[in-house]
Image: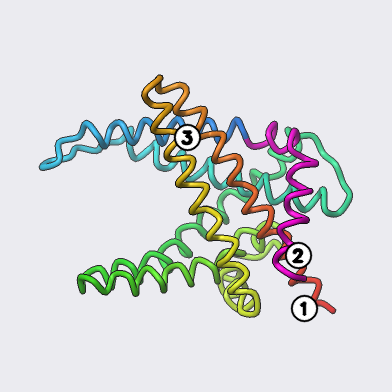
Amino acid sequence: MSLSAILSEAYYFFRNHLGQLAVLTMPLLLLQVGIQAWLGHELAIADATDPQFGAPHFIAVMVLLVIFSILIAALTLFLQLRSDGHELSSGAVLKASLPFVPPLLLAAVFSGMAIVAPVMLFAAFGPFWIIGLSISFYLFARLAYVNFMVVVEHITPLEAIKSSFVFSGPIAFRTMVLLLLYIPLSLVGGTLAQAAQLVGLTLQILVETLFAFIGLFVNVALYRLYMVQRQQQAG
Protein backbone atom coordinates (compact mmCIF):
# COMPACT_ATOMS: atom_id res chain seq x y z
CA MET A 1 0.00 0.00 0.00
CA SER A 2 1.31 3.44 -0.91
CA LEU A 3 2.20 6.02 1.71
CA SER A 4 -0.57 8.34 0.49
CA ALA A 5 -3.11 5.55 1.01
CA ILE A 6 -1.76 4.94 4.52
CA LEU A 7 -2.11 8.63 5.36
CA SER A 8 -5.62 8.77 3.87
CA GLU A 9 -6.82 5.80 5.90
CA ALA A 10 -5.19 7.18 9.05
CA TYR A 11 -6.85 10.55 8.47
CA TYR A 12 -10.33 9.05 8.06
CA PHE A 13 -9.85 6.86 11.13
CA PHE A 14 -8.66 9.83 13.19
CA ARG A 15 -11.54 12.00 11.98
CA ASN A 16 -14.23 9.36 12.44
CA HIS A 17 -13.10 8.52 15.98
CA LEU A 18 -12.08 12.02 17.04
CA GLY A 19 -14.46 12.18 20.00
CA GLN A 20 -13.53 8.76 21.38
CA LEU A 21 -9.82 9.47 20.95
CA ALA A 22 -10.21 12.79 22.76
CA VAL A 23 -12.05 11.23 25.71
CA LEU A 24 -9.45 8.46 25.94
CA THR A 25 -6.25 10.48 25.56
CA MET A 26 -6.85 14.15 26.40
CA PRO A 27 -6.86 13.73 30.21
CA LEU A 28 -3.57 11.84 30.04
CA LEU A 29 -2.08 14.39 27.64
CA LEU A 30 -3.21 17.29 29.82
CA LEU A 31 -1.58 15.71 32.87
CA GLN A 32 1.56 14.97 30.89
CA VAL A 33 1.87 18.51 29.54
CA GLY A 34 1.19 19.99 32.98
CA ILE A 35 4.02 17.99 34.56
CA GLN A 36 6.34 18.89 31.70
CA ALA A 37 5.52 22.57 32.20
CA TRP A 38 6.36 22.30 35.89
CA LEU A 39 9.66 20.55 35.15
CA GLY A 40 10.47 23.18 32.55
CA HIS A 41 9.81 25.93 35.09
CA GLU A 42 12.01 24.20 37.66
CA LEU A 43 14.80 23.88 35.11
CA ALA A 44 14.47 27.55 34.12
CA ILE A 45 14.82 28.82 37.69
CA ALA A 46 17.59 26.39 38.65
CA ASP A 47 21.10 27.68 39.28
CA ALA A 48 23.01 26.96 36.06
CA THR A 49 26.28 26.52 37.96
CA ASP A 50 24.83 24.22 40.61
CA PRO A 51 21.40 22.86 39.66
CA GLN A 52 19.60 21.09 42.47
CA PHE A 53 17.16 18.35 41.53
CA GLY A 54 15.58 16.31 44.27
CA ALA A 55 13.03 13.61 44.87
CA PRO A 56 10.03 15.63 43.55
CA HIS A 57 11.74 16.04 40.18
CA PHE A 58 12.66 12.35 40.00
CA ILE A 59 9.11 11.37 40.92
CA ALA A 60 7.74 13.73 38.25
CA VAL A 61 9.94 12.12 35.58
CA MET A 62 8.82 8.64 36.63
CA VAL A 63 5.17 9.72 36.58
CA LEU A 64 5.70 11.09 33.07
CA LEU A 65 7.06 7.75 31.91
CA VAL A 66 4.11 5.90 33.44
CA ILE A 67 1.59 8.30 31.89
CA PHE A 68 3.27 7.93 28.49
CA SER A 69 3.17 4.14 28.78
CA ILE A 70 -0.52 4.17 29.71
CA LEU A 71 -1.22 6.54 26.82
CA ILE A 72 0.56 4.37 24.26
CA ALA A 73 -1.00 1.16 25.59
CA ALA A 74 -4.51 2.65 25.61
CA LEU A 75 -4.14 4.19 22.16
CA THR A 76 -2.78 0.96 20.69
CA LEU A 77 -5.53 -1.14 22.27
CA PHE A 78 -8.13 1.28 20.96
CA LEU A 79 -6.67 1.09 17.45
CA GLN A 80 -6.57 -2.69 17.60
CA LEU A 81 -10.11 -3.06 18.93
CA ARG A 82 -11.66 -0.62 16.46
CA SER A 83 -9.71 -2.13 13.55
CA ASP A 84 -11.10 -5.54 14.51
CA GLY A 85 -14.64 -4.16 14.75
CA HIS A 86 -14.89 -4.21 18.55
CA GLU A 87 -15.92 -1.34 20.78
CA LEU A 88 -15.20 -0.75 24.46
CA SER A 89 -15.69 2.23 26.72
CA SER A 90 -12.72 4.50 27.40
CA GLY A 91 -12.64 3.28 30.99
CA ALA A 92 -12.47 -0.36 29.89
CA VAL A 93 -9.67 0.41 27.43
CA LEU A 94 -7.67 2.24 30.11
CA LYS A 95 -8.17 -0.62 32.56
CA ALA A 96 -7.06 -3.17 29.97
CA SER A 97 -3.98 -1.09 29.17
CA LEU A 98 -2.54 -1.13 32.71
CA PRO A 99 -0.89 -4.59 32.51
CA PHE A 100 1.17 -3.35 29.56
CA VAL A 101 2.73 -0.49 31.51
CA PRO A 102 5.70 -2.43 33.01
CA PRO A 103 6.82 -4.01 29.68
CA LEU A 104 6.34 -0.70 27.87
CA LEU A 105 8.49 1.06 30.47
CA LEU A 106 11.25 -1.50 29.95
CA ALA A 107 10.90 -1.23 26.19
CA ALA A 108 11.19 2.56 26.43
CA VAL A 109 14.39 2.29 28.48
CA PHE A 110 16.08 -0.28 26.23
CA SER A 111 15.06 1.22 22.89
CA GLY A 112 15.69 4.75 24.17
CA MET A 113 19.24 3.87 25.14
CA ALA A 114 19.85 2.35 21.70
CA ILE A 115 18.45 5.40 19.92
CA VAL A 116 20.29 8.03 21.98
CA ALA A 117 23.65 6.24 22.03
CA PRO A 118 24.86 7.33 18.53
CA VAL A 119 24.12 11.01 19.22
CA MET A 120 25.98 10.91 22.53
CA LEU A 121 28.90 9.04 21.01
CA PHE A 122 29.36 11.31 17.99
CA ALA A 123 28.77 14.48 20.06
CA ALA A 124 32.26 13.97 21.46
CA PHE A 125 33.66 14.59 17.95
CA GLY A 126 32.27 18.09 17.47
CA PRO A 127 30.63 18.60 14.07
CA PHE A 128 30.21 14.85 13.59
CA TRP A 129 27.20 14.98 15.89
CA ILE A 130 25.06 15.27 12.77
CA ILE A 131 26.14 11.76 11.79
CA GLY A 132 25.09 10.48 15.19
CA LEU A 133 21.77 12.28 14.85
CA SER A 134 21.15 10.64 11.46
CA ILE A 135 21.95 7.20 12.86
CA SER A 136 19.70 7.82 15.85
CA PHE A 137 16.81 8.86 13.63
CA TYR A 138 17.29 5.74 11.51
CA LEU A 139 17.24 3.58 14.66
CA PHE A 140 14.16 5.48 15.83
CA ALA A 141 12.42 4.45 12.62
CA ARG A 142 13.54 0.83 12.90
CA LEU A 143 12.31 0.62 16.49
CA ALA A 144 9.08 2.55 15.92
CA TYR A 145 6.97 -0.61 16.17
CA VAL A 146 8.27 -1.89 19.51
CA ASN A 147 5.28 -0.58 21.48
CA PHE A 148 2.78 -1.99 19.00
CA MET A 149 4.41 -5.40 19.23
CA VAL A 150 4.41 -5.40 23.03
CA VAL A 151 0.68 -4.60 23.14
CA VAL A 152 -0.66 -6.39 20.05
CA GLU A 153 1.62 -9.42 19.92
CA HIS A 154 2.15 -9.78 23.69
CA ILE A 155 5.90 -10.33 23.43
CA THR A 156 8.65 -9.22 25.81
CA PRO A 157 10.41 -5.86 25.38
CA LEU A 158 13.64 -7.43 24.16
CA GLU A 159 11.78 -9.66 21.71
CA ALA A 160 9.83 -6.62 20.50
CA ILE A 161 13.04 -4.63 19.92
CA LYS A 162 14.55 -7.46 17.87
CA SER A 163 11.31 -8.08 15.98
CA SER A 164 10.75 -4.38 15.24
CA PHE A 165 14.23 -4.02 13.77
CA VAL A 166 13.68 -6.97 11.44
CA PHE A 167 10.06 -6.13 10.68
CA SER A 168 10.72 -2.48 9.78
CA GLY A 169 13.45 -3.19 7.22
CA PRO A 170 11.20 -3.13 4.12
CA ILE A 171 9.24 -0.10 5.37
CA ALA A 172 12.08 1.94 6.89
CA PHE A 173 11.75 4.80 4.40
CA ARG A 174 7.98 5.10 4.76
CA THR A 175 8.36 4.97 8.54
CA MET A 176 10.89 7.82 8.48
CA VAL A 177 8.57 9.92 6.33
CA LEU A 178 5.75 9.45 8.83
CA LEU A 179 8.02 10.31 11.75
CA LEU A 180 9.10 13.50 9.98
CA LEU A 181 5.51 14.72 10.34
CA TYR A 182 6.36 15.45 13.97
CA ILE A 183 8.66 18.31 12.84
CA PRO A 184 6.04 20.71 11.36
CA LEU A 185 3.62 19.83 14.17
CA SER A 186 6.29 20.64 16.76
CA LEU A 187 7.26 23.89 15.04
CA VAL A 188 3.69 25.16 14.73
CA GLY A 189 2.73 23.94 18.19
CA GLY A 190 5.84 25.45 19.78
CA THR A 191 5.26 28.81 18.09
CA LEU A 192 1.63 28.97 19.18
CA ALA A 193 2.51 27.81 22.71
CA GLN A 194 5.05 30.63 23.03
CA ALA A 195 2.43 33.12 21.89
CA ALA A 196 -0.09 31.64 24.34
CA GLN A 197 2.47 31.97 27.15
CA LEU A 198 2.12 35.74 26.88
CA VAL A 199 -1.54 35.35 27.85
CA GLY A 200 -1.00 32.87 30.65
CA LEU A 201 0.24 29.45 31.66
CA THR A 202 -3.22 27.89 31.42
CA LEU A 203 -3.63 28.79 27.76
CA GLN A 204 -0.08 27.62 27.01
CA ILE A 205 -0.81 24.21 28.54
CA LEU A 206 -4.08 23.92 26.62
CA VAL A 207 -2.37 24.75 23.32
CA GLU A 208 0.43 22.25 23.96
CA THR A 209 -2.12 19.60 24.91
CA LEU A 210 -4.09 20.23 21.73
CA PHE A 211 -1.03 19.80 19.53
CA ALA A 212 0.05 16.73 21.48
CA PHE A 213 -3.37 15.29 20.66
CA ILE A 214 -3.01 16.21 16.98
CA GLY A 215 0.39 14.53 17.04
CA LEU A 216 -1.34 11.23 17.84
CA PHE A 217 -2.28 11.16 14.16
CA VAL A 218 1.31 10.05 13.47
CA ASN A 219 0.80 7.09 15.82
CA VAL A 220 -2.41 6.21 13.99
CA ALA A 221 -0.60 6.31 10.63
CA LEU A 222 2.27 4.19 11.98
CA TYR A 223 -0.21 1.64 13.33
CA ARG A 224 -1.92 1.43 9.94
CA LEU A 225 1.42 0.89 8.23
CA TYR A 226 2.26 -1.73 10.84
CA MET A 227 -0.97 -3.63 10.21
CA VAL A 228 -0.58 -3.50 6.42
CA GLN A 229 2.97 -4.81 6.63
CA ARG A 230 1.92 -7.59 9.01
CA GLN A 231 -0.80 -8.69 6.58
CA GLN A 232 1.65 -8.69 3.69
CA GLN A 233 4.17 -10.75 5.61
CA ALA A 234 1.47 -13.18 6.75
CA GLY A 235 0.29 -13.57 3.14
Tell me the residue that label 2 is attached to: 227
Give the magenta range: 1-25
Q: Is residue 185 above or below residue 103?
A: above
- For the N terminus, which image quadrant? bottom right
Which tag, 1 or 2, sits closer to the chain's start?
A: 2
Residue under pointer 3: 33
Q: Earlier in the sequence, mark 1 or mark 3?
A: 3
At x 46%, y 64%, the residue is 110
Task: In this rendered view, identify the residue nearer to me: 100 or 206.
Answer: 206
**Disc 1 to disc 3, C-alpha distance:** 38 Å
Residue at figure coordinates x 38%, y 64% from the top left? 116
Q: Position of residue 195 (x, y in %)?
A: 40, 30
Percent from the top left, x then y, of residue 70? 60, 43
Dot 1 falls on a residue whose secondary structure is: helix
**Cα distance in 3D space between marks 3 and 2:** 30 Å
**Mark 1 = which residue?**
233
Q: On the picture, is 136 further left or further right than 171? A: left
**Residue 132 part of the magenta segment:** no
Please state which of residues 190 and 113 is positioned toward the viewer in this rendering.
Answer: 190
* Residue 13 counted in the magenta span: yes
Q: Quadrant of residue 6?
A: bottom right
Q: Judge by depth and name the residue closer to the eye, 143 or 134.
A: 134
Residue at (41% x, 74% y) in the render:
135
The residue type indicated by label 1 comes to Gln
